[in-house]
């Protein structure tokens, strides 16, 4: 019934007449202290009983500081791209129209889609061409994901110029479905003195690029309203190339309810801070329950990640304001004890050992870094590991380098069992679905994973510059 109604409503119109056309930027992008905007949703129509979306990658000039227009690469003219929102079990298709002057792909970070629909580097979409990605949303996969390009050696640039967006999978029986929701899609913007987005320099290539503005939903230090005593559900997405977000709100504790692959089994309450490595997502409950009312800083606390070239973040950076708004009525909320059941993956019957390494090399008379997995840089023509579809495997991933590197795998959510550092093993205290997990220098993690689809998958460091410099490898699932 619902679909029929949507279909009738949409039938005579094109996808664009329904959309808000190009999103408007009424104020210069970097203007601070404006109310947080919600992200636009990508318009949907039904095509052969699949939910059909369209994303056009194209450049757009946006006023960033008064009088200065900056060129971004956008999806549907937005910054970030529109939310693609679907339900478990949906069949969907997304038509990518490439109007930028580079080859691109669309990768569905964290969603279990067939390999040939996952925007792998070997499936590029050329300029002025389009591609229709088609896949189904697995049951049990409700959660917070994102989409971004995954071209060979071009992903980092396309992401930092603005090409990324939120992908939400909903479960109609989600136990937290009645809570008001906010999305905080976090990106990083670097603009130079001329107000333009510069190419990566050597420091960016080594450390991973950090900009001079951390944006939330494309806004600079926005104000987020909450009612006194209100409980809100926040989805945090770290879509930056290389920022480690040690997230905290002054005078507030946080309740974590979800990770990359959806809800946890049990909420984790009373957290004073939470860290998101590049590409990680977290779901939080934020409550307007501080002793005083007024404004609170939403901060990114200092984090040392073993940078090779640039300065570490030594001080807390304010990225937004939490504002108590007494006109927001709050409804009663009691935190469920259990959010869902996560079945532990069974006993592994195969193993993999993955080692992250950095090496210094000389290139045109200057020192440059090589980022390697098991001693090799990424080669599209090579298969680095093979897994059998449906088999539970134990992966041991070690970081034998000086920097933090977030490990990411395509095609599956995994379960991290334990971490090891200097011979000390620490079991993880809770079960969660993850597709990205940070490794500090010298750390080893052990995780269980099972791939469902046959085909080619990638695994890599999700500092986008490291991925582009070779810290990526190919898994063939057979
Ligand atoms: Cu978020 Cu291989 O990607
Ligand atoms: Cu991915
Ligand atoms: Cu890395």
Image: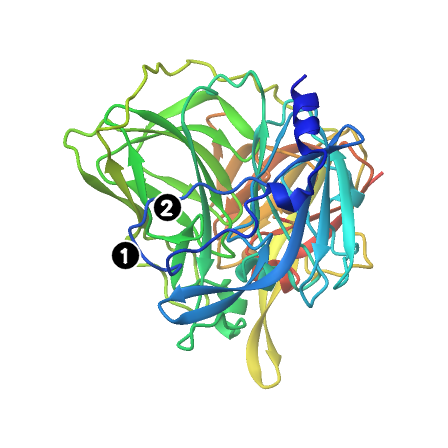
| 400 relative position to 116: left or right | left
Q: Quadrant of residue 305?
A: bottom left
Is 385 situated above or below 464? above
Secondary element under disc 1, as helix, strand or loop, is loop
Number of numbered discs visible in the structure rendering: 2
Figure colour scheme: rainbow
Is 400 situated above or below 425? below
The label shown at residue 315 is 1
| 215 relative position to 388: left or right | left
Closer to the N terminus: mark 2 or mark 1?
A: 2
Is 371 situated above or below 56? below
The label shown at residue 246 is 2
| Of 469 and 333, the residue lying toward us | 333
> Label 1 neighbourhood size at 10 Å, few (<14), some (14-19), many (20+)?
few
Q: Quadrant of the C terminus?
A: top right
| 22 relative position to 448: left or right | left
Q: Is residue 431 something that shows in the picture? A: no
Q: Quadrant of residue 190?
A: bottom left
Q: Residue furthest right?
A: 478
Is 120 situated above or below 127? above
Secondary element under disc 2, as helix, strand or loop, is strand
Q: Position of residue 229 (x, y in %)?
A: 25, 23
Q: Residue furthest front?
A: 12
Residue beneath the point at 49% across and 63% down: 209
Q: Quadrant of residue 350?
A: top right
| Of 391 and 212, the residue lying toward us | 212
Q: Position of residue 183 (x, y in %)?
A: 45, 38
Q: Quadrant of the N terminus?
A: top right
Distance from disc 2 to disc 1, alpha carbons, whole Å, reads: 11 Å
Q: Is residue 229 something that shows in the picture? A: yes
Residue beneath the point at 23% across and 40% down: 250
Residue beneath the point at 63% across and 22% down: 140
């Amino acid at each position: 019934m619902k679909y029929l109604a949507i279909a009738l409503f949409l039938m005579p119109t094109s996808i664009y007449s329904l959309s808000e056309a190009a999103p408007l930027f009424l104020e210069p992008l970097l203007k601070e202290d404006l109310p947080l905007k919600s992200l636009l949703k990508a318009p949907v129509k039904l095509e052969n009983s699949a939910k059909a979306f369209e994303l056009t990658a194209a450049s757009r000039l946006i006023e960033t500081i008064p009088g200065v227009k900056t060129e971004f690469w956008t999806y549907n003219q937005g910054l970030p791209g529109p939310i693609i929102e679907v339900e478990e079990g949906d069949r969907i298709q997304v038509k990518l129209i490439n109007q930028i002057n580079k080859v691109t792909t669309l990768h569905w970070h964290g969603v279990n889609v067939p390999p040939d629909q996952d925007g792998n580097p070997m499936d590029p979409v050329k300029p002025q061409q389009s591609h229709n990605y088609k896949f189904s949303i697995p049951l049990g996969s409700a959660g917070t994901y994102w989409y971004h390009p995954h071209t060979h050696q071009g992903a980092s640039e396309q992401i930092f110029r603005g090409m990324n967006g939120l992908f939400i999978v909903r479960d109609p029986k989600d136990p937290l479905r009645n809570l008001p929701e906010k999305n905080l899609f976090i990106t990083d913007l670097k603009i130079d003195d001329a107000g333009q987005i510069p190419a990566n320099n050597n420091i960016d290539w080594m450390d991973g690029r950090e900009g001079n503005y951390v944006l939330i939903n494309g806004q600079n230090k926005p104000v987020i309203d909450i009612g006194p005593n209100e409980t809100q559900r926040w989805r945090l997405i770290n879509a930056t190339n290389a920022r480690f977000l040690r997230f905290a709100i002054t005078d507030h504790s946080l309740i974590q309810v979800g990770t990359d692959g959806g809800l946890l089994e049990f909420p984790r309450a009373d957290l004073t801070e939470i860290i998101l490595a590049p590409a990680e997502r977290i779901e939080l409950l934020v409550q307007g329950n501080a002793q005083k009312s007024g404004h609170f800083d939403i901060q990114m606390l200092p984090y040392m990640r073993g940078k090779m070239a640039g300065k570490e973040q030594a001080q807390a950076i304010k990225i937004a304001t939490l504002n108590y708004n007494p006109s927001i009525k709050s409804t009663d909320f009691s935190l469920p004890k259990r959010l869902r059941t996560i079945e532990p993956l069974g006993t592994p019957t195969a193993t993999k050992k993955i080692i992250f390494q950095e090496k210094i090399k000389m290139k045109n008379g200057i020192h440059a870094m090589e980022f390697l997995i098991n001693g090799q840089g990424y080669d599209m023509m090579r298969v680095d590991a093979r897994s059998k579809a449906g088999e539970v495997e134990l992966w041991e991933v070690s970081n034998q380098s000086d920097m933090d590197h977030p490990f990411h795998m395509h095609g599956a959510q995994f379960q991290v069992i334990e971490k090891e550092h200097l011979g000390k093993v620490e079991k993880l205290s809770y079960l969660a679905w993850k597709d990205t997990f940070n490794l500090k220098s010298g750390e080893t993690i052990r995780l269980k994973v099972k791939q469902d689809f046959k085909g080619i998958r990638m695994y890599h460091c999700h500092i986008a510059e490291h991925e582009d410099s070779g810290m990526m490898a190919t898994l063939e699932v057979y």
